[in-house]
Amino acid sequence: MAGSKYAYVKNFEIPDPLLPNTYMVLRVDGHGFHRFSESHSFTKPNDQRALELMDAAALAVMQEYRDIVLAFGESDEYSFLFRRSTQLYNRRQSKILSTIVSYFTSCYVMNWSKYFPSTPLEYPPSFDGRIVLYPTEKEVRDYFSWRQADTHINNLYNTLFWALVQEGEMTTADAHATLKGTVSGQKNEMLHSRFGINYNTLSARFRKGSVISRKTETPESVPPDESDGSKRKAKPKVTLEISHVDIIGDEFWNEISDIL
Amino acid sequence: MAGSKYAYVKNFEIPDPLLPNTYMVLRVDGHGFHRFSESHSFTKPNDQRALELMDAAALAVMQEYRDIVLAFGESDEYSFLFRRSTQLYNRRQSKILSTIVSYFTSCYVMNWSKYFPSTPLEYPPSFDGRIVLYPTEKEVRDYFSWRQADTHINNLYNTLFWALVQEGEMTTADAHATLKGTVSGQKNEMLHSRFGINYNTLSARFRKGSVISRKTETPESVPPDESDGSKRKAKPKVTLEISHVDIIGDEFWNEISDIL
Amino acid sequence: MAGSKYAYVKNFEIPDPLLPNTYMVLRVDGHGFHRFSESHSFTKPNDQRALELMDAAALAVMQEYRDIVLAFGESDEYSFLFRRSTQLYNRRQSKILSTIVSYFTSCYVMNWSKYFPSTPLEYPPSFDGRIVLYPTEKEVRDYFSWRQADTHINNLYNTLFWALVQEGEMTTADAHATLKGTVSGQKNEMLHSRFGINYNTLSARFRKGSVISRKTETPESVPPDESDGSKRKAKPKVTLEISHVDIIGDEFWNEISDIL
Amino acid sequence: MAGSKYAYVKNFEIPDPLLPNTYMVLRVDGHGFHRFSESHSFTKPNDQRALELMDAAALAVMQEYRDIVLAFGESDEYSFLFRRSTQLYNRRQSKILSTIVSYFTSCYVMNWSKYFPSTPLEYPPSFDGRIVLYPTEKEVRDYFSWRQADTHINNLYNTLFWALVQEGEMTTADAHATLKGTVSGQKNEMLHSRFGINYNTLSARFRKGSVISRKTETPESVPPDESDGSKRKAKPKVTLEISHVDIIGDEFWNEISDIL
């Protein structure tokens, strides 16, 4: 074959299988989204449309890749948890990482005009990604707690920061200086006393981020097939649910314990 | 800090630096593009618009990432060669791989309507990617020869195959059977005798694929700066050139020897 | 500094940390021990001295490396299990692998003359090694079951094989041919009927391999320090026990459950 | 087969091939040799017997592993360079690393009594090891220059340090304080003026370390085979040479250019 004398270059491809029976978390992150959000005039501190677009892309990823059982998104990042036993692409790291990040990106760009109908894309947005392996459920749960705690910290800060700038007419430098060293209680208090904002009544999407879980519902009773009267095997119904609930406490994890 | 008790999960992120001073080739491949090309009615054996869209996305990648010095594309794949000494993202594999594949995907989707104005995207296209390291120039050159030889083999086959189907009114099964075991000479002969096609006169884009190289031109003389008469340092002008030339022979490599 | 212009070569050392919180099993294997056992006239099918020497080397490794909690040896191989949370050498793979294999080898050679007082070493024996990670206890247990099942299979085969050769005066080729395709029951039966050997009465060391576990005993009561009458903190006593017991069933694992 | 239900644990063994066509340098280092050298009363600043023992072990490694073309040793470390194209153990990292380190250790312990006839081993010495890949000859050469520059720096320091302690009757703390911040010229001067030592006349082994290279000599003329008068193919004669020469300058590398 014409190409065979060159085919030896394939031998330089090093296999990269991920350790079997560990939990994979793949996180995508907006690349240079500080600039991207300014170029496209994202509302501060949170842009509902931008967050919904992220959710839509993540939902599409989970519809396409059935071995993803849970996802969590905030700001310009999304984390996807795979079933421990997934054999997707034989657990090849580069293949999984590149394909999922590419598909997420594609969904983001394709759906842009639906969420930003009057804001054309100025330039192509991109995302980076990484895969982290966790051997036990405890680390998986702590990983998602880590991200949701991060959501809270960032959102409280940003909510107050932009209130100081937008309503308090501070410069951004002054706003940062004002917030420096404050703890959560002080930030809550300032929000309330200065701007009349009760933090806990803000949109759960902003405070808690977005959670997408794959729920399997086995129908309790299945009527016999009418055509021949035989018993049919109940086909479990799988649904993807998006919510903005607490995932740090036990309740969430007890409910979805079957997916881990 | 609220999240600090969970932050230990970051320790599970394993560093993944690529060996310094080796050539990186990053190849992106259309994911499931057999189906994608059918869903979007790509012309067979080659769709000029689809190839130009790939070229446009690759060109955008090279404009954004200056350490890519050469790229080669055919069908639904593109290979990018980085400068040996690149320090992009500290040579972290996942970061480089995911970001470039994401950016390529983003450019592909954003530019779709320009090349397919009357064909809406039916669903989000995606690409996978991998990075392969090569220690020497010889392997780099053989890698690109391998891809161009592959272009030739596939295109000759596909050109004849689709001639048999479209003009010869064969079934695809019969066309495959007819071609089985034939060598290049026989295929050329069949193309000519049955369909009056002289393979070598077909579009170079189809026969040779697309080559994008980064050319650095140092202006030979720079006039003195008029404001103060001092000599100015000539700023080398970098241009990206797209062509469909042979990259297996020596000529191409002699010309671009400075980029390796 | 004189060497500083060359020190950049250190940058080519790629970090190789093992995934945290996973079980490490490090297995050492005799390198070319078929030849080594013949050169040093090991008794067939089992050489008690050679096995005791392996045990001695493994015991020394466990005395030196406190994070190894369990070891299993058979023939010319030994497997070492580390505590899941071990931070030995910051979990650097090459460092752990090379140091332990080196220490094992050193102990083997140093102790040779104790177990083979009248057989000088003809040439330097060596061992290779590998580290395998297991995320859960189940796999760890199955790993050790796999090795002990292997011990049984090999020992039954070898016991009968060498009986056929040594007592039955068969050639080795004939002995292999005789055994080909036989199952365990048939081998047991042949051993008994032809050679009067009841397999189950053979030395447990040969049939079960060697198990070394680290036992932690917390003294129930500690008398007060006589010098000042103060209560002393009970220091747990750690002992290494070597045995030749079944490690496939539950009993063994229930007893040592605290070490996992 | 009895063990087959457990054999799945083998799937957790991750392949670890080293990038093809790169230079491998494997360095072994004495583990805890500060203590080891004190326990065994090594002469300071250099123990001729200990260095010769290291050389003997390294020589044995090179006799056994033909793909090692160059080695350099100083103090308690030795570096081995493999032929770029070596296929030893299919370039599996763990296999190569563990086997060579084990063999080196074995040779060290077996040969101990030859070099230390009246000093029994107090406890088993061990070595750690690592493999570093270098893509080009330049880095390989700089690697060895780095080690030899290190030899020089350490030896000059140690020679003066021990002269201050042994002949100057300083405490080790005072000796370190005296040397702090001095440059090479000052150390040479102190050695000469205080102790009458001309550094350059010290043993080359101490100043330059040990170099072992594999020399291939093709006999210039081969007499015809007498039995049939036919021309015989000259079989190249390979010899291992140990020396204590400069390997930083060009001369050494020009001479051995054929091995790279």
Image (cartoon, coloured by chain):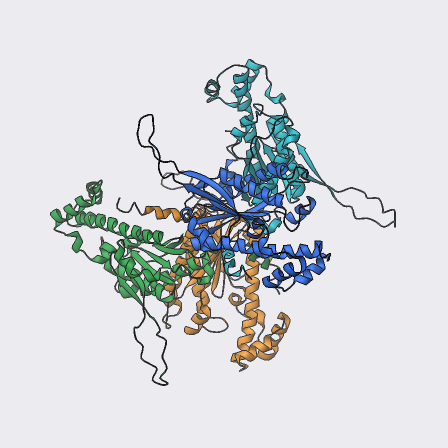
Chain colours: A cyan, B blue, C orange, D green
Q: Is residue D193 above or below residue C200?
A: above
Figure quadrant of residue B188:
bottom right
Figure quadrant of residue D36:
bottom left
Q: Nearer the viewer, residue C20 or B24?
A: B24
Q: Looking at this rendering, what residue extends furthest in the bottom direction?
A: D227
Q: Position of residue A168 (x, y in %)?
A: 53, 14
Q: Position of residue D42 (x, y in %)?
A: 25, 56
Q: How many marks?
A: 0
Q: Is residue A203 visible?
A: yes
Q: Nearer the viewer, residue B247 or A215?
A: B247
Q: Is residue A56 above or below residue B22?
A: above
- Please report the residue visible at 44 percent of the width from the left and 63 percent of the height from the top: C54
Q: Is residue C3 above or below residue B161?
A: above
- Please report the residue visible at 62 percent of the width from the left and 59 percent of the height from the top: D5
Q: Position of residue D219 (x, y in %)?
A: 30, 73
Q: Is residue A136 visible?
A: no
Q: Nearer the viewer, residue A49 or D101?
A: A49
Q: Position of residue C113 (x, y in %)?
A: 37, 68
- Please report the residue visible at 36 percent of the width from the left and 39 percent of the height from the top: B220
